[in-house]
Amino acid sequence: AAEREDEGVALGGGVVGDLAGFAAACWMRGVRYLQIPTSLLAMVDSSVGGKTAVDLPQGKNLVGAFHQPCAVAIDTDLLATLPERELSAGLAEVVKYGALGDAPFFAWLEQQADALLAGDPLVLAEAVRRSCEHKARVVVADETEQGERALLNFGHTFAHAIETETGYGALLHGEAVAIGMMLAARMSSELGLAPLLDAALRAALLERFRLPVAIPAELADKLDPSALLSRMRLDKKNVSGRLRLILWRRIGHAFVAEDVDSHHVLEVLTDALAGG
Ligand code: GLY
């Protein structure tokens, strides 16, 4: 058995990184571990920042701990053999950084979309670097998510509800995040907070990255808006039973919306499931 001085290595995608990190957080009240992410999603998001967790049938990442890795070692050459669908899923989290707080990065992604999809190693490495720098900056300022770090969950409250309700596996996490970010944009527009044009621009970029921007019909048939809302009520960002969601005002300007009216959320979910 590992001793306190031993060190774990998380070599794999997001699930492996989260699980190995959680095991390292629990074992003997915490042993050191190293993250070596092998998927784009793990490189740009889950391996950085020390969130570790496992999913429960009741909700995603419900059991977990903040436990920083001693280092994150990223070799973007590993992306050369990543399946196309996994590359696209990772690009959803890359788009997230631009959408939530970095409009120039969003514009750069639009310019470089073809190169990213073609797996251009230099462009991919640049996207990974800028994403990691963004995330590291936020995590240094707010490691345990008392404030700004919540913005990194843009689209995730919707995404986690969809992933949990569909039993984890119908969609990749990044695909669910792409849909979740569009639902958050729709809420923002319906509340009169954000122009529809920005949502359309982001949908166009996500679609270029071969990502879904609406709940696929075959899943929508099996989902119930009230059940999704109940899942959203279990989100870790909520305070005193009040729904907190990440909404936006335009590309590069996301914010934490406190005490969101659940009737609005239910309307957005009902429309989305009806194909609206
Ligand atoms: N994936 C969001 C965060 O690490 O805070």
Image (cartoon, grey):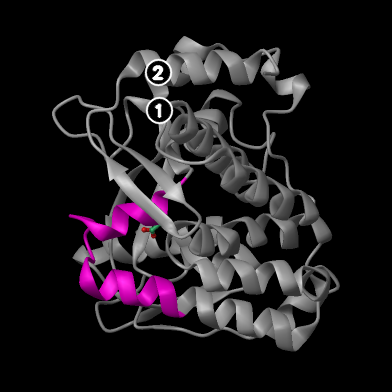
Of discs 1 and 2, which sits in the foreground? 1
Quadrant of residue 146 within the rendered picture = bottom left
Q: Is residue 183 above or below residue 223?
A: below
- What's the residue at 13%, 28% (across, down)? 240
Q: Could one spot residue 11 in this view of the protein?
A: no
- What's the residue at 30%, 70% (across, down)? 139
Q: Secondary structure at mark 1?
A: loop
Q: Would residue 273 appear left or right of 186 to someone viewing this image? A: right
Quadrant showing the N terminus: bottom left
Q: Secondary structure at mark 2?
A: helix
Q: Which residue is mark 2?
A: 264
- As shown in the figure, which amino acid type bears the numbered disc 2? His
- As shown in the figure, which amino acid type bears the numbered disc 1? Leu
Circles 1 and 2, Cβ within 8 Å, touching? The answer is: yes
Q: Which range of residues does the magenta coloring cover?
A: 133-154
Marks 1 and 2, the one that precedes in the sequence: 1
Rendering coords of residue 44 (x, y %): 54, 70
Instruction: Residue 126: say if magenta.
Output: no
Q: Between residue 127 and residue 85, name the one nearer to us.
A: 127
Q: How many residues crowd mark 1 within 10 Å: few (<14), some (14–19), many (20+)?
A: few
Circle on res. 26: none
Quadrant showing the C terminus: top right
Quadrant of residue 212 within the rendered picture = top right
Q: Is residue 222 above or below residue 72?
A: above
Q: Could one spot residue 45 in this view of the protein?
A: yes
Q: Which residue is mark 1?
A: 191
Instruction: Residue 153: say if magenta.
Output: yes
Rendering coords of residue 224 (x, y %): 55, 11
Q: Would residue 145 appear left or right of 221 to someone viewing this image? A: left
